[in-house]
Image (spheres, grey):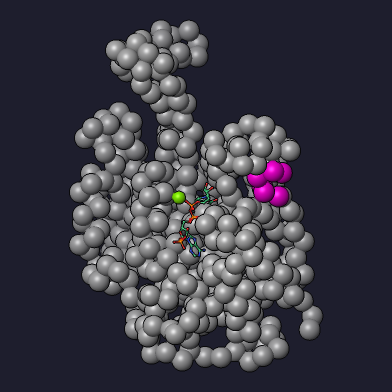
């Protein structure tokens, strides 16, 4: 069988631990047998980041900026324990933060819906998409451990000789901690535009919340820029599309989302999005049941997983014990990247393959063949779970001809959710903007 040709190189960012193990399986069994794809490979495995002085992470981000589309495996963010475990020369920064800081942009995260899992929040009738601002705040912070009594201040020195601004943070009477964070008007504006464009494209309401009642200047700037972008660029188009922009304090908003029927784009500041996307994924089954894509304001895309390296499973894998890790988010990351590559290259056969791959993976889950994380969630409850590798093999077998030697097997369970629940624009695919969307 002739392989499908992918025109432009795809940037691959390999990662760590169990995610790396699954990554290799997915690539070997679900991608390379079917596609003739030139891969621009960057190994973000922690020891290699250490050997290259983390240059590899920066080069990978730049390669995404060159080629336009990347696919990223989960990576370890070093902390003191990891420095010891891997004998690192330094506690290298979070690679996701490095990449996001270089490319800027917004992460769109969407639960992967399957017919035989009911969301744990029974009121949610429609999917909620999270838009997580991917620049700044605590992810690019500067921190000091104050060793004892002393004065901590914020100091801003403007270029061009204007007087410096100085604000007291705290007069310490004893030891403590201090943190400095930042954001830029440009990045916040890009975030606001990406959210408005996405909501308009999908015709869904946009909700946004910050803590501007407490953080009047910092969070207040987010609120003001969103209002400015909405008023000046989107108000009329939203009205014409019959959708709304809604702002509330973040704590109020969380309660309202829980009581809602879902169906909105929920714009979150960086940290809020980090926390709330894990919560959302879990409501829909597992951390592996969510897609995540970074969309930069210049139209670059990094498809990734919202979950991490699944360290606990990796420890078992290293001991030679069987594992049952869910590769669905990884499969969707590859599929999302390929679909986008197909769209940008004008090669619909590549995008069609990506869609078939997603469908095959969903079909396997809907037939009740699932990894351990989903056993308690799917209806009817399966009698056993698949191993990590069995799941990938099942997806390969479910790829319809000409992709698979074996015919695809259809769903054998009654759908708990009618497919109409997904809506016409919510096939099993993850969210993404068409190129002109941002
Ligand atoms: P994690 O890797 O997301 O895993 C947390 C737990 O969630 C797992 O122990 C497992 O639960 C469950 N889980 C997550 N993904 C799963 C999957 N695909 N299949 C089945 N179960 C899954 O988070 P973590 O253990 O806190 O972090 C591990 C490492 O990942 C850390 O070094 C962190 O820095 C890194 N991280 C990377 C990224 C990224 O690169 N995108 C994101 C987050 C964290 P059970 O053990 O109960 O089965
Ligand atoms: Mg996270």
**Which residue corresponds to the image point at 39% horizontal and 55% vertical from the top-left?**
277
Q: Is residue 133 visible?
A: yes
Q: Which of the pair 76/360 is nearer the observer?
A: 76
Residue 59 at least partly seen:
no
Residue at horizontal 32%, vertical 61%?
264
State which quadrant residue 435 falls in: bottom right
Q: Position of residue 289 (x, y in %)?
A: 45, 67
Magenta stretch: give its range.
Answer: 43-48
Q: Is residue 43 left or right of residue 372?
A: right
Q: Nearer the viewer, residue 94 or 126?
A: 94
Q: Is residue 47 magenta?
A: yes
Residue 93 painted magenta: no
Q: Quadrant of the N terminus?
A: bottom right
Q: Residue at x 47, y 26 (%)?
A: 142
Q: Position of residue 202 (x, y in %)?
A: 40, 65
Asked if residue 148 is positioned above or below residue 232 in the image, the reply reads: above
- Counting every numbered tag in the picture gives 0
Q: Quick check: 325 above or below 17?
A: below
User: Which residue occupies 60% across, 37% down?
Assistant: 83
Q: Position of residue 5 (x, y in %)?
A: 75, 71
Rendered position, 144 above or below 227: above
Quarter-wise, where is residue 324 in the image?
Answer: bottom right
């Amino acid at each position: 069988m002739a392989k499908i040709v992918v025109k432009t190189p795809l940037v691959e960012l390999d990662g760590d631990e169990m995610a790396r193990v699954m990554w290799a399986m997915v690539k070997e069994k679900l991608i390379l047998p079917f596609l003739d794809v030139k891969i621009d490979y960057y190994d973000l495995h922690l020891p290699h980041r250490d050997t290259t002085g983390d240059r590899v992470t920066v080069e990978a981000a730049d390669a995404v900026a060159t080629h336009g589309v990347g696919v990223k495996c989960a990576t370890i963010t070093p902390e003191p324990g990891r420095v010891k475990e891997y004998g690192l020369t330094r506690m290298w920064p979070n690679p996701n933060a490095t990449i996001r800081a270089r490319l800027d942009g917004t992460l769109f995260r969407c639960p992967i819906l399957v017919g035989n899992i009911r969301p744990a929040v029974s009121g949610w009738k429609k999917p909620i998409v999270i838009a997580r601002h991917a620049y700044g705040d605590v992810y690019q912070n500067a921190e000091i451990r104050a060793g004892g009594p002393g004065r901590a201040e914020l100091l801003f020195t403007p270029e061009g000789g204007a007087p410096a601004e100085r604000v007291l943070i705290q007069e310490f009477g004893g030891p403590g901690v201090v943190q400095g964070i930042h954001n830029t008007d440009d990045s916040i504006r890009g975030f606001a535009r990406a959210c408005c464009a996405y909501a308009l494209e999908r015709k869904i309401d946009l909700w946004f919340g910050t803590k501007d009642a407490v953080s009047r200047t910092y969070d207040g700037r987010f609120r003001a820029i969103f209002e400015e972008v909405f008023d000046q660029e989107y108000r009329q188009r939203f009205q014409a599309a019959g959708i709304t922009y809604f702002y509330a304090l973040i704590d109020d908003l969380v309660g309202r989302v829980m009581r809602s029927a879902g169906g909105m784009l929920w714009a979150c500041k960086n940290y809020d999005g980090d926390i709330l996307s894990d919560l959302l994924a879990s409501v829909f089954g597992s951390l592996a049941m969510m897609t995540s894509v970074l969309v930069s304001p210049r139209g670059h895309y990094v498809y990734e997983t919202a979950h991490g390296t699944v360290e606990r499973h990796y420890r078992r894998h290293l001991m030679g014990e069987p594992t049952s890790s869910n590769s669905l988010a990884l499969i969707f990351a590859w599929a999302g990247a390929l679909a986008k590559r197909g769209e940008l290259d004008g090669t619909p056969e590549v995008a069609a393959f990506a869609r078939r791959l997603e469908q095959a993976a969903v079909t396997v889950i809907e037939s009740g063949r699932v990894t351990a994380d989903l056993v308690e969630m799917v209806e009817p409850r399966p009698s056993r779970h698949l191993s990590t590798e069995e799941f990938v093999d099942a997806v390969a077998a479910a790829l319809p001809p000409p992709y698979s030697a074996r015919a695809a097997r259809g769903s054998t369970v009654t759908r708990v959710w009618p497919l109409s629940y997904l809506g016409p624009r919510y096939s099993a695919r993850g969210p993404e903007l068409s190129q002109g969307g941002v």
